[in-house]
Image (cartoon, grey):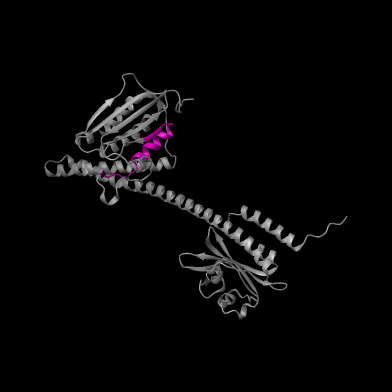
């Protein structure tokens, strides 16, 4: 038994369904526009189709795609909102059917000349999403007869699908561009850190060498040399921090973990910061148990983490402030707390202070100095060794505490409760 051939309307609806599936699976904007152009010409049986998108910054339409045209070339053709067929469709949010385009005063002849295409008939419908105009979809030169109400209904249905698909493709493209920009920025930043730290080492070594030589002199020369050495030492600390950050980013640090008392590491870190703490007349107290708290870590990499944390506490605490270094056993792990009576941290800044180059202070009113990478380095050194780090503060003016959780002896991971 022969089945009757499907009607034109059935074939058109089937094609619309097929297009819908294709659009939902296409995230590349150029491919999407090409699919839409082909679908419009197939479904409406016309010679050509065009998609014009709205440029919000310039308040005009531009050709995003057109049958048989180079997208890069047609995108350069501006289409005014006022005085053009597409502009009228977009502005008034209604479909327009024209069966003799050349006689319509709204016909924008400049487009026909540049595309080398002579339109006879035109059907255009607006593309909208969430009540916002996206652009215009046009079908040109009906092959058989004139564009009718059914053609308008079909093209409007296609335009509705197109608006959503274009909106989604643009969002995905924007996210991809943002990710690529971030990746490129990270690469440039990492390269800069490596280059700057390398290039600064040689002249700094020469400065320290001459300053050490001059320090052996007497009188005013020796005094000047001490100032130069102090400044050079500060510069060397900055360079070492930059190098450490670069190596962490490039995963170039080598760790040699072993069982070590955390008290030993904390004492070594404080010995490094003690001169600065004493110069600022800070009261530093230790709350460490007599029994060794053993952790599995590389002490040569763990000590710098605590040096950076202590440096932060010392710098952000006014002279004569209090700093407490404490450690205890916590559910099988070892928890270290470095608490200060400094400027404190707002709740929304607690996570941000570990970001690279993040500064709590505005750059033009800074009082405390630093590159903003000390806590970033501390976080990297601790987390690479299986630990955790976080900040606590009750708010501005109420001090802050940096908490560190380290794996117990014999394991490289934290002991978490079941």
261 vs 67: above or below: above
Determine which quarter of the picture holds residue 312.
Answer: top left
Quarter assignment of residue 95: bottom right
State the image coordinates of residue 39 (x, y, percent, origin top left): 66, 62
Residue 115 in view (yes/no): yes
Can residue 75 be seen here? no
Is 109 or 292 nearer to us in this picture? Answer: 109
Q: Which residues are magenta?
A: 368-390
> What residue occupies the far right of the structure in this picture?
1
Question: From the viewer's perspective, is residue 108 above or below residue 317?
Answer: below
Q: Residue, x 54% and y 74% (percent of image)?
A: 84
**Residue 244 lies in quadrant:** top left
Per the image, is 180 magenta? Answer: no
> At x 57% / y 79%, what residue is drawn?
105
Residue 397: x, y in percent?
26, 39
Residue farthest toward the left in the current orientation of the protein: 219
């Amino acid at each position: 038994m022969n089945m009757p051939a499907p009607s034109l309307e059935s074939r058109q609806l089937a094609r619309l369904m097929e297009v819908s599936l294709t659009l939902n699976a296409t995230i590349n904007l150029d491919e999407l526009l090409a699919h839409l152009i082909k679908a419009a010409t197939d479904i409406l049986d016309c010679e050509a189709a065009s998609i014009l998108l709205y440029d919000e910054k310039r308040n005009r339409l531009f050709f995003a795609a057109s049958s048989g045209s180079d997208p890069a070339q047609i995108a350069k053709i501006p289409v005014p909102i006022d005085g053009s067929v597409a502009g009228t469709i977009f502005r008034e949010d209604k479909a327009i059917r024209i069966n003799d385009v050349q006689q319509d005063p709204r016909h924008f002849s400049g487009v026909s000349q540049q595309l080398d295409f002579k339109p006879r008939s035109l059907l255009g419908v607006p593309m909208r999403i969430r009540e916002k105009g996206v652009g215009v979809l046009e079908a040109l030169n009906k092959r058989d007869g004139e564009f009718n109400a059914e053609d308008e209904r079909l093209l409007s249905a296609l335009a509705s699908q197109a608006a959503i698909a274009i909106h989604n493709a643009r969002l995905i493209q924007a996210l991809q561009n943002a990710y690529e920009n971030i990746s490129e920025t990270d690469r440039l930043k990492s390269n800069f850190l490596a280059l700057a730290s390398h290039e600064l080492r040689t002249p700094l070594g020469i400065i320290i060498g001459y300053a050490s030589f001059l320090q052996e002199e007497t009188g005013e020369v020796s005094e000047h040399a001490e100032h130069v050495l102090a400044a050079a030492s500060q510069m060397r600390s900055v360079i070492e921090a930059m190098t450490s950050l670069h190596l962490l980013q490039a995963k170039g640090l080598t760790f040699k973990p072993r069982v070590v008392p955390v008290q030993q590491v904390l004492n070594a870190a404080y010995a490094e910061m003690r001169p600065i703490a004493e110069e600022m007349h800070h009261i530093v107290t230790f709350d460490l148990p007599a029994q060794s708290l053993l952790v599995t870590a590389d002490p040569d990499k763990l000590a710098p983490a605590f040096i950076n944390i202590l440096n932060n506490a010392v710098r952000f605490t006014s002279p004569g402030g209090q700093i407490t270094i404490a450690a205890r056993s916590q559910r099988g792990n070892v928890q270290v707390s470095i608490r200060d009576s400094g400027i404190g941290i707002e709740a929304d800044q607690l996570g941000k202070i570990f970001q690279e180059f993040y500064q709590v202070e505005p750059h033009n009113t800074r009082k405390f100095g630093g590159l903003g990478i000390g806590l970033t380095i501390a976080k990297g050194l601790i987390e690479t060794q299986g630990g955790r780090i976080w900040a606590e503060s009750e708010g501005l003016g109420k001090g802050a505490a940096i908490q560190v959780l380290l794996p117990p002896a014999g394991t490289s991971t934290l002991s978490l409760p079941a």
